[in-house]
Amino acid sequence: MISEVYNMNCMCYMKSLPDKFFDLSIADPPYGIERFSKGSLRIAKGQKYEQGIKWDKAPKQDFFDELFRVSKHCIIWGANNFSLPKTEYFIIWNKEQTVDNFASLEYAWTNVKKPAKMFTYSIHKCMAERKKNGGKIHPTEKPIALYCWLLEHYAIGGGGKIFDPMFGSGSSRIAAYKLGYDYVGCEIDKEYFDKANERFNRECLGKQKLSDGTIIQQQTLF
């Protein structure tokens, strides 16, 4: 099983690939939401609040062109913010959000020919998991359970190669590893890339990085 990640611009990586190289790509690109560009947000535990969200710039059309070229099928989160081909297929994540000024649902475009589906997973469960794992890595971090559900329902025929062009906190990588899929991911931000790698090593390989940089292999006794 392959689990490869690259700290690089996904456009550079995709341009090196042949057509339809991946069976399924799951993308969660920046949405380019105007209110984020004017507001402030703490992007990771322990960091200061910064004015504006520098990373929240919606990708241009060439990103989607390349993603469609290298992928047999795609799932794209935040599709209501982009100009994508017409499709009757879509996915909803119901967060069971109880706070009025936060989104209760997230919408994803897909060209996998399956009836529209909804995955319900409480935002409160997400928050509890993040707290258990030492805090939030990425401001748009999605739960591992969501990616497991996507793979179980949308990876055609099971198996195959999965791609996440902007894997952020690494939830998609962990889900793919746990379900036995070959996986490739790109993340351009070095800090997110390193934190996601640490998370993967801890959750999937039982490795823990100490404060001095030493990596130890954890052992489970039965």
Image: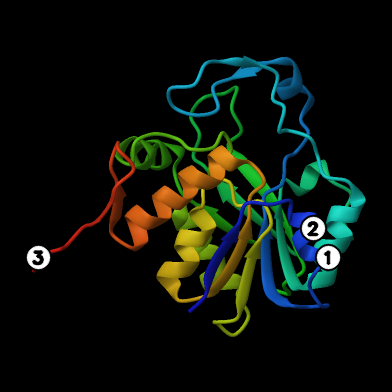
Q: Residue at x 73, y 33 (%)?
A: 56
From this viewpoint, is residue 115 visible?
no
Which residue: 46% across, 49% down? 121
Residue farthest toward the bottom in the current orientation of the protein? 157
Instruction: Say the numbered circle drawn on residue 12.
Output: 2
Query: CA–CA distance between discs 1 and 2?
Result: 5 Å
Q: Closest to the observer: 90 or 82?
A: 82
Q: Is residue 59 left or right of residue 143?
A: right
Q: CA distance from mark 3 to mark 1?
A: 45 Å
Where residue 221 appears, x then y in whole percent?
9, 65
CB contact under 8 Å: marks 3 and 2? no
- Which residue is disc 3 drawn over? 221
Q: Quadrant of residue 218?
A: bottom left
First in sequence, mark 3 or 1: give its number.
1
Q: Which numbered disc covers residue 15?
A: 1
Nearest to the observer: residue 94 or residue 214: 214
Q: Mark 3 belongs to which amino acid?
A: Leu
Query: Crowding at label 2, few (<14), some or many (≥20) Cα neighbours within 10 Å?
Result: few
Sooner in the amino-acid sequence: mark 3 or mark 2: 2
Vertical comparison of 28 with 89: above or below: above
Q: Residue at x 50, y 34 (%)?
A: 97
**Residue 199 coordinates in the image, percent (x, y):** 40, 49
Question: Tag 3's secondary structure?
Answer: loop
Cα gap from disc 3 to disc 2, whole angstroms: 44 Å
